[in-house]
Image (cartoon, rainbow, N blue to C red):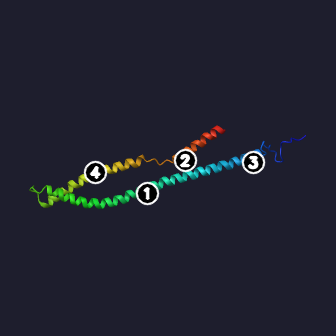
Amino acid sequence: MGDTKTGATGARPDAGGESLASLIGRLGEDIVTLLDSKLGLLKLEIKEDVNAYLRGLVSIGVGGIIAAVGFSLLSVAIAFLVSALFEQTLLSQPVRYALGFIITGVIYLVVGAAVIIRAKDRLAKQNLAPERSIKELEKDKQWLKRES
């Protein structure tokens, strides 16, 4: 006679009454939903990291402009001060001013290079990898290994 456990489609229902085809379909939907949520998390995390990085760059830019104005005024004052140190020499006034500006410029170049190197190193150390998404994907990978 006929097999009473086989439905009209030929698929055998499990103990809960769902057929294998519907279970596979539901698994596929769940995997798509999981991947969609993981991609959403990845997008959000990357967006947060990029926004934080851009805010930092804008702050550096604004601070740089303000510092440049102050730096210019201070440089002129220091150059005149350094040129005053050559007052007792036999150098003419224009040469003393030139020496004052040259010495001041060299000092600022050295200090500026040190600041740039330090900022570059700090930016290089910043990790832009989406750590939370990577951890979640590792958890999912381990879960899938256990389940299969």
Q: Earlier in the sequence, mark 3 or mark 1?
A: 3
- Residue 103 in picture, x, y percent from top left: 20, 53
Quickly name the residue at label 1: 55
Q: Earlier in the sequence, mark 1 or mark 4?
A: 1
Where, quadrant-wise, is the N terminus in this rendering?
top right
Q: Quick check: 129 left or right of 94?
A: right
Q: Is residue 28 above or below residue 97?
A: above
- At x 51%, y 52%, the residue is 46
Quickly name the residue at label 3: 22
The residues bearing labels 2 and 3 have C-alpha atoms spaced at a distance of: 30 Å
The residues bearing labels 1 and 4 have C-alpha atoms spaced at a distance of: 25 Å
Q: Quick check: 15 left or right of 4?
A: left
| Foreground of the two, 69 or 1 | 69
Quickly name the residue at label 4: 111
Q: Residues within 10 Å of mark 3 (few under 14, many from 20)?
A: few
- Residue 80 in picture, x, y percent from top left: 18, 59
Q: Earlier in the sequence, mark 1 or mark 2?
A: 1
